[in-house]
Image (spheres, coloured by chain):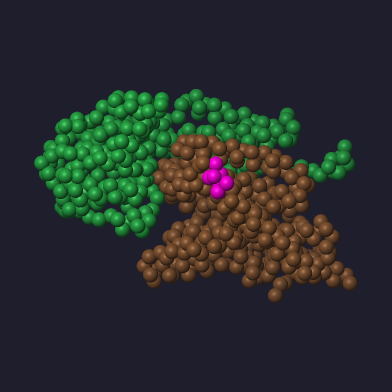
Amino acid sequence: MKVPLLSPGSSKPAPHLYFVNTPVDALLIGGLSIVAFLAMGALQRVHGQQLQWMGAVAALTWLCNWPHFAATSYRLYHSQENIAQYPLTALLIPVVMVAAIISSLAAPYTIAPYFVKLYLIWSPYHYSGQSVGISLIYARRAGFPFGRLERLALSGFIFGTFIAQTVRSEVGVSRQAFYGVTYPSIGLPPWTATVATTAMIVSGVVFLVLVLRWCVMTRRMLPPIVFLPAVTQFVWFVLGWRVPSFYSFVPFFHGLQYLLIAWAMQLSETMAQHGIKPSTSFVGGESLRWGIGILLGGTALFWLLPHVVATAGFDYNLAYPVVIAAVQVHHFFVDGVIWKLRNPGVGGPMLVNVEDLVRRPRAAVAAA
Amino acid sequence: MTKHWLALASLLLAAPVVRADDGPRVADERIVLHTTVGDLVLALYPDVAPQTVEQLLNLTRLGVYDTVPFYRIDPAFLVQLANAQSRTVPMTPEQSAAIHRLPAEFSGLRHRRGTVSIAHEDNDPNSGETSFSILLIDAPHLDGKYTIAGRLERGEDVLDAMSRVPRDSQNRPLSPVEVERAEVMTGEQLAGMTLRGPTAQKGDELPSLAMVKMCGALVFVGLVVFLLAGRVFPPQAGSMGLLVVLTGGFGLFLSLMPRARASEHLAVGLFLGVLALFKLMSWFERPQPPPQQVIRNK
């Protein structure tokens, strides 16, 4: 049951805390990944070795992770107005990415490893940015004022989880492979892992203290969903690497988080742009149309495009990692600019609840 | 035609480590190791170590040696290939199943520079599998204790270059040196092939100072443009400035990575620089106002 949070003195109803409701939001934002981590960890202990879930990973990647990239592209490119709003991101970045692909294919040993490496560090950074953003959305919905210090502490903890994990894998000299491209480690000294972990913990403690202070001062409890993205990040990057079979699912869970937000935005914006009245049939029809579109888009970006590049005479084991790295770096750029919460065109629709899309708005109901 | 002449010339120029008449019969099939430093051609002795040679050829055909690193480079002794289990790309079940423990096949041959000698555990001469060494010096103390499977036929200059890569105190290379791909080729096939000579290790050569300076200058100029966009330059110039920062930053990343592995401070600086680059890119572009709004503002 959803309880609207009313802010005193405001004539407008406060936004719902959730996009859908408590269980759906909690599961998609991180609960499902935490449950999966616990289950896979327990299975690993029982079997004494990690289990192979490659079939499931592949299926979920196709159903969820690839579409989440396509959802970003769709959001940017589906209308001329959007392209006009971000012309450089929409038109110039793809050119830069094509140049990166060509350079990497032409220099598979001198450029490709570093392009792939850059993407592989950028990816968890991007996950962290999304987790911070989702926390801010829920905090705003809950009426928790995020000051500069709170935001800094929360970002410090969330980004700290990714930095601690990345630093750990970059300590010393080693070489790893991403499909057919092998790349070297940076060779960080071991003490950096300790520093990164300590910074993460300190940031987390500071954030908790600030939240506690706010709770005491306002005599309100902060809903747990605000903390969930941060806890999820911790599970993904700090605890997750101990369960390798779980680790390969993290991109799927990241995609799941994203799709919830992007889906709600898609419905909200389409309804506003076309003046559509709330209805179940609209939500169902638009969700189906959008879902099929991004499923096909994801398949085109991650299956068709690498095959097309490989047909030009390049080894698929080189073409695939390079192309998908470029597609994802493009996604990081686009996400970085189109989801700014301080942009009213984004922050407003982001407070939508699915109930508002299937029924008449609460304010209208109250007025009627 | 030119290709054939080049191949012939490279054959003539390549000085064999051991003369053809200076040892036992050599199998027609050679193992070519395409390493990150250059190509090495190994000639094998099927009459001296038949089981070992058979396994080496079989594993090479199956791709087992692809991405296996040289874990030990001792310029005063040998270069040693690690076990296939430690290769970068995990082995397939078929590849793993093809690896068998090798019985010792000792012979009266001498361990000389260029000898391919099978590694085994200290107290078990019958424990050889995939790891082997190529000697850089004559090593009589190894005679009769290790299986000699063949010798380096071509690529002595590559072996020399390999022995010069930077190493730590335990003779582990600071920058990974590995077999990118290994293949079995006949003498005839090799005759028509141009081998890759010693190269600075791929991506691991120290960057030229000019490139570092140029990339650094790009980052600086891009940052200045970004920071002054909207004041000195038009607002859109900020995005172009960030694009210049991205280009210069990637150039710095590419050119400083090899050096970073030898300098802790540089490694830390490089990592922090990469994080700063990501943060900067999140400010790549602000939304342009819709056309109507522009007209109203005017």
Q: Residue at x 57, y 46 (%)?
A: A308
Left or right for A347, reference B172: right
Q: Nearer the viewer, residue B261 or A154?
A: B261
Residue B53: x %, y % from top left:
23, 47
Where are the magenta residues, as a range? A306-312
Q: Nearer the viewer, residue B237 or A302?
A: A302
Residue A316: x %, y % from top left:
50, 47
Q: Residue at x 32, y 52 (%)?
A: B85
Q: Is residue B79 above or below residue A139?
A: above
Q: Quadrant of the C terminus of chain A?
A: bottom right
Q: Residue at x 70, y 75 (%)?
A: A1
Name the main secondary structure of what is drawn in magenta: helix
Q: Is residue B231 above or below residue A7?
A: above
Residue A309 covered by magenta stretch = yes
Left or right for B131, reference A195: left
User: Quick one: which residue is furthest to the bottom in this view?
Assistant: A1
Residue A349: x %, y % from top left:
75, 58
On the question of residue B123 being in view, the answer is yes
* Colour used to depict chain A in the structure image: brown
- Mark count: 0
Q: In the image, which lettered chain appears green?
A: B
Left or right for A337, reference A161: right
Residue A211: x %, y % from top left:
62, 60
